[in-house]
Amino acid sequence: MPPLFDAVPWVSLVMGAVILTVIIGAWVWFEHRVDPGRGAMDGPDGNACLRGKCGDAMEISLKFSNNRVIDAKYWTDGCRMSGLCGAAAAKLALNKTPEEIADIDYQVIEREVGGLPEEDLHCATLAAGVLQEALRDYLFRQNQQTTQSTAAVGPRSIKEEPTDYIERQVS
Ligand code: FES
């Protein structure tokens, strides 16, 4: 008598699909538990995605309520260090006002991750640059809605990051 999986090949296909779904689901769940800031955001109030000269892209999305960040997400296709720095930038932005976010530069991010070797400093600079661009995007959108909000917080309050390695805006 042939084994069940040989006699009914679709059974093994279904079993394979179920096992794959469980593995992917567990991986997504684990990633979210370990790094809740990683991922995309629907309808962000401010968003930026930049690519550094190293070739890595990073995106940060901010959601505001009452002029404070209530949700921040990051995404990167870069190395572990860029992931660490993106996560730190998103975490640091939480509960902050635009003025407070403007103070988050690459040194703040470097401190947040516990220090970086010289060759990885650009990961922190990229994360800081993307965060400031996301803030600029938020302020720009606010400016579109009302001229009053930009009177209180103008783009000139945003620090210029030493992000000369950032070649171009991806989106
Ligand atoms: Fe590209 Fe870290 S190596 S951002």
Image (cartoon, helix red, strand yellow):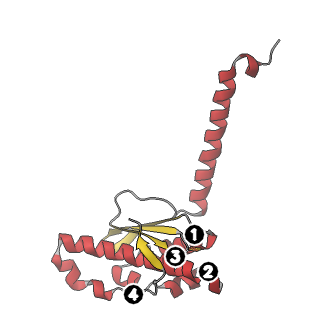
- The answer to which of marks 3 and 2 sits earlier in the sequence is 3
Mark 2: secondary structure: helix
At mark 3, the secondary structure is loop
Query: Looking at the image, which residue is at 49% across and 59% down?
Result: 39
Residue underneath mark 4: 160
Q: Is mark 2 within 8 Å of ligand 1?
A: yes
Which mark, by number, is residue 83? 1
Q: Quadrant of ligand 1?
A: bottom right
Real-space Cα distance between discs 3 and 2?
13 Å
- Residue 30 position by quadrant: bottom right
Query: What residue is disc 2 on?
Result: 120
Label 4 element class: loop
Disc 1 beta carbon < 8 A from ligand 1? no
Label 3 belongs to which residue?
Answer: 53
Residue contact between numbered discs 1 and 2, judged by CB atoms under 8 Å: no
Q: Dot 3 surroundings within 10 Å: few (below 14), some, or many (20 or more)?
A: some
Residue 67 visible in the displayed image: no
Residue neighbourhood size for the residue with mark 2, other residues' Cα within 10 Å, grouped as few (<14), some (14–19), many (≥20): some
Q: Is mark 3 within 8 Å of ligand 1?
A: no
Name the N-terminal-most of marks 3 and 1: 3
Q: Where does residue 161 sit, x and y in percent of width and height?
A: 43, 86
Type of amino acid at the residue the image marks with label 2: Asp
Q: CA distance from mark 1 to mark 2?
A: 12 Å
Extreme residue toward the top, this view: 1
The residue that appears at 51% across and 84% down in the rendered structure is: 106
Determine the CA span between mark 4 and mark 3: 18 Å
